[in-house]
Amino acid sequence: MRIAVTGCTGFIGSGVMRRARQESWDALGLARRAEGQGVVACDLRAPGEIAKALEGLSVDCVVHAAAATRRDIPDAEAGYANNVASTVNLAHAAISAGVKRL
């Protein structure tokens, strides 16, 4: 199985990546910055970036573990953009890319 994990550099996402690799799955990370092998830079607030990343990865499943926490967001508008709108963007891109599970 080939999966993409958003928030792969965070606490939960890094654990998902570790476990997926233990299970011999092909795990690819999506993060704001490409940090390390197997991580693609992708801003979830930018629908075009997500679509481009997912189209090129040909994944079976996306695990969405990215989130902005209270300390990361200055106001409600930024919180909405970072968490709610980003999730909607990801869902649309996953559907367009033919991802079977989100």
Image: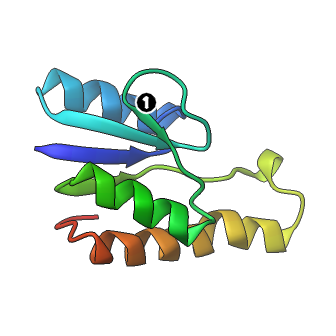
**x, y percentage for residue 40?**
46, 40
Residue placed at 33% from the left, 69% from the top? Answer: 94
Three-letter amino acid code at disc 1?
Answer: Ser
**x, y percentage for residue 38?**
36, 29
Circle 1 SS class: helix
Q: Is residue 70 left or right of residue 11?
A: right
Residue behind mark 1? 14
Residue 76, quarter of the rendered image: bottom right
Identify the image's colour scheme: rainbow, by chain, secondary structure or one colour.
rainbow
Q: How many marks?
A: 1
Residue situated furthest right in the rendering: 74
Q: Quadrant of the N terminus?
A: top left
Residue placed at 32% from the left, 38% from the top? Answer: 28
Residue 80, quarter of the rendered image: bottom right
Q: Residues within 10 Å of mark 1 (few under 14, many from 20)?
A: some
Give whichever of 38, 72 is nearer the camera.
Answer: 38
**x, y percentage for residue 51?**
42, 66
Q: Is residue 64 left or right of residue 75?
A: left
Q: Quadrant of the C terminus?
A: bottom left
Is residue 60 depicted above or below 18 in this figure? Answer: below
Q: Is residue 76 left or right of residue 29?
A: right
Residue placed at 22% from the left, 56% from the top? Answer: 61
**x, y percentage for residue 35?**
54, 26
Is residue 61 depicted above or below 47 in this figure? Answer: above
